[in-house]
């Protein structure tokens, strides 16, 4: 069993134990076919990338929240922070290779002391779209962050914000007492500066994750529910809702094991494998960069220390677009989470 949330020390031994769990049980006995075997059945092995369009950069694991489902294991105790030098390397690579989107994540990316510098210089370099994945409560966590809505609007940043549900109970159970009220206030502040207003073109999206060991519901239906409830109760507008499946790694894997739901959840993901979703999974057009500048096929692989395949293409300082286009994408059984049901990516469902 992997280390619990209380005991995990953010070391590689914890990562090794997660990988061991992912390949144990029904996969170990052969009663469940592996993700690789499923790809072979649908002629998608080895899994190959399409054109690189998105740089998803994790600027650090520090966060003002400690969410139960967090696959990054983020929290106030995390000290990993990307330097300005590594940020500049990312900007240089994006500009040289005509990559159109810079997607900033964490932790709470805004807590990196160079976050604003990164955004300002990325925009100045002509990057077409800058996304920040915000937990919303950071805006109210400290007076130093209260002007983030204005900063985002000034630089036309696309805000993708986490809101587990449109009611207080479910949200606070998943993310902590008081999170819902702070999130609502932050969304209202974003609306006040023009987000989700067709006249401004400033985009505000929400992210929904299930609170337990089950797949998200229909994304379109959830979006209509969220829009109606948030408008009626709080006069809040937003653009899109992304329904994302919780992948069995880090804290969510802890929860699955502690609640004795791991085997059932994996069987559910495997049973819902959708070959149509494979073509749209985010590892095909995205590279994930960690706080040290190492490259991964996705943010989930980053948490499992599964760097991109092939020598000479594993760190931003040795970025080689040709090598990355020719690589095989690294997979393991956690990848079933991205291909289950309607599929799942950082942009929501796929099929």
Image: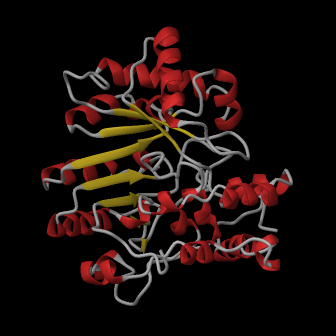
Percent position of residue 321, x then y: 25, 78
Q: Report which quarter residue 98 is drawn in.
A: bottom left
Identify the residue at horizontal 68%, vertical 37% (top origin).
174
State which quarter of the image contains the N terminus: bottom right
Percent position of residue 78, x then y: 57, 57
Identify the residue at horizontal 28%, vertical 78% (top origin).
319
Left or right of residue 54: residue 243: right
Asked which colour scheme the image uses, the reply is secondary structure
Against 300, residue 129 (above or below) is above
Identify the residue at horizontal 65%, vertical 55% (top origin).
272
Q: Report which quarter residue 8 is drawn in.
A: bottom right
Against 42, residue 117 (above or below) is above
Percent position of residue 211, x then y: 68, 39
Residue 5 visible in rendering: no
Percent position of residue 265, x then y: 75, 55
Residue closest to the eye, 306 or 328 = 328
Residue closest to the eye, 61 or 96 = 96
Identify the residue at horizontal 34%, vertical 20% (top origin).
191
Left or right of residue 43: residue 14: right
Residue closest to the eye, 24 or 27 = 27
**How many numbered badges does the structure rendering display?**
0
């Amino acid at each position: 069993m992997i280390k619990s949330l209380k005991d995990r020390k953010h070391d590689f031994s914890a990562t090794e134990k997660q990988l061991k769990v992912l390949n144990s049980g029904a996969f170990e006995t052969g009663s469940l076919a592996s993700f690789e075997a499923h790809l072979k059945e649908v002629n998608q092995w080895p899994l190959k990338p399409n054109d690189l369009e998105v740089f998803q950069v994790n600027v650090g694991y520090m966060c003002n929240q400690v969410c139960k489902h967090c696959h990054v294991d983020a929290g106030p105790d995390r000290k990993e922070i990307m330097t300005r030098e590594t940020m500049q390397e990312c900007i240089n690579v994006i500009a040289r290779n005509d990559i159109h989107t810079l997607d900033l994540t964490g932790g709470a990316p805004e807590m990196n002391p160079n976050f604003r510098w990164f955004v300002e210089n990325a925009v100045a370099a002509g990057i077409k779209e800058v996304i920040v994945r915000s937990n919303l409560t950071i805006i109210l966590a400290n007076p130093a962050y209260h002007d983030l809505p204005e900063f985002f609007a000034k630089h036309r940043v696309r805000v993708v914000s986490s809101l587990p549900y449109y009611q207080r109970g479910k949200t606070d159970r998943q993310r902590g007492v008081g999170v819902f009220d702070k999130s609502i206030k932050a969304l209202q502040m974003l609306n006040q500066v023009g987000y989700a207003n067709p006249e401004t073109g400033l985009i505000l999206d929400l992210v929904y994750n299930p609170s337990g060991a089950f797949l998200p519901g229909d994304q379109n239906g959830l979006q209509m529910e969220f829009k109606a409830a948030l408008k009626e109760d709080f006069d809040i507008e937003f653009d899109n809702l992304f329904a994302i499946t919780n992948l069995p790694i880090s804290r969510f894997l802890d929860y699955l094991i502690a609640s004795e739901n791991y085997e059932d959840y994996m069987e559910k993901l495997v049973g819902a494998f959708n070959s149509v979703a494979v073509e749209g999974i985010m590892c095909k057009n995205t590279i994930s960069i960690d706080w040290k500048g190492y490259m991964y096929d996705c943010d989930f692989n980053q948490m499992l220390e599964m760097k991109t395949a092939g020598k000479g293409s594993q760190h931003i300082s040795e970025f080689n677009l040709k090598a990355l286009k020719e690589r095989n994408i690294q997979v393991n059984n956690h990848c079933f989470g991205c291909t289950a049901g309607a599929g799942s990516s950082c942009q929501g469902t796929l099929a």
